[in-house]
Amino acid sequence: MKPVKIAVGVITKDRPEMLGTLLASYASMARPDNAHVEFIFVENDAVASLTEILEAFRASVPEPVFYETEAEPGIPFARNRVLEIALANGADILTFVDDDERVAQDWLVQLANGLLSRDLDLVGGPLKIEAAAPVSSAWQAAVLAYLQERADKNRRTRSAMVADGTDHELNAYTNNWALRLDFARKTGLRFDNALRYTGGSDTAFSKSVRNAGGRNGYVPDAVVHDRIPAHRLNLRYLYRRTRDQARNGVQIHQKSALKVASLVIPRLLEALILAVSSPLTGKRSLVKAVYKTGLTDGRIRGILGLKSQLYAPGKTGS
């Protein structure tokens, strides 16, 4: 059997320390049998600043390591640069994770096997949430616990869909993602550069795969650890990120005003009850109220056509 060529892709900007943790997990992870692996890094900047750290990584792994810059600001531009490099190199599979994560030891084995064994075109996998550094306050601990709870619930729900054979309906996100590149060659699909600052280009890509006749899926055992830095473990960031993700969902999936109203009203009532009861029920209730209020705000903004700027220069979403 011909070996499978897997391109492990990463886009990055201004996070060398967190990238170092990802690189260490790449160096120690298992490689799939009968596979040739290569690493592709694209720094979303006009100036290369990672030469030293990537030279050290190159010396720690036996596989080829490619490094380029993408001067045009915006996540989809950098993702598309990685995709073009992988296609030019003749890769069969392209993966993505985020530069602030670390992969489980068997992540690539599980992800590639999940894609190939079920003859899928695009797959995603689960996140396990952890703090990048020890939490320093009760509020940080409460936000972290809620994010972990949601991630665990998400994994259980999606795993059940795999068992039911309905996971083709799911979107795959580039925090844990693999694409069969023959599908990209056949269809010409790319990430939508118009979503450079809003986020959601991976969601739109998933939708485009389905619309082009592709088969999406989910790989429950291909685990990536999402490392949340301290500055994100607060109610303000939780609200902003939830709001902007909800707004993108409404706009990418073109949800109607009636559908949005049916989602907004119950969530707003739940948020009010949680907030009022939080002096008795504790910090978790207020964290959950903030999350649900962010959902409501984002969905209303989405139906009004207001665009997110979460990833614009100077913002903290990236």
Image (cartoon, rainbow, N blue to C red):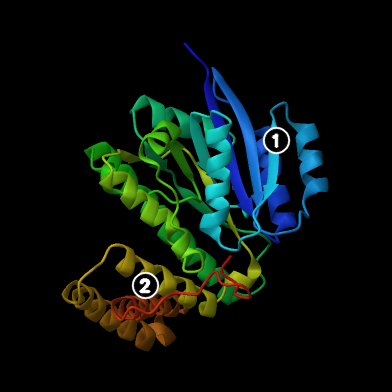
- Place of residue 252 in the rendered image (x, y in percent of width and height, measured from the top left): 33, 63
Which residue appears at 38% of the width and 85% of the height?
A: 275
Gap in angstroms between the C-alphas marked 1 and 2: 37 Å
Q: Nearer the viewer, mark 1 or mark 2?
A: 1
Kindly state the secondary structure of the residue where label 2 is placed.
helix
Q: Which mark is residue 247?
A: 2
Kindly state the secondary structure of the residue where label 1 is placed.
strand
The kind of residue tagged 1 is Val
Q: Where is 221 relative to 102, above or below?
A: above
Q: Which mark is residue 22?
A: none
Characterize the local packing of mark 2: few (<14), some (14-19) or many (20 or more) Cα atoms within 10 angstroms: many
Query: Residue 31's image quarter?
Result: top right
In the rendered image, which residue does mark 1 sit on? 65
Which residue appears at 73% of the width and 30% of the height?
A: 61
275 on left or right of 104? left
Which residue appears at 76% of the width and 35% of the height?
A: 58
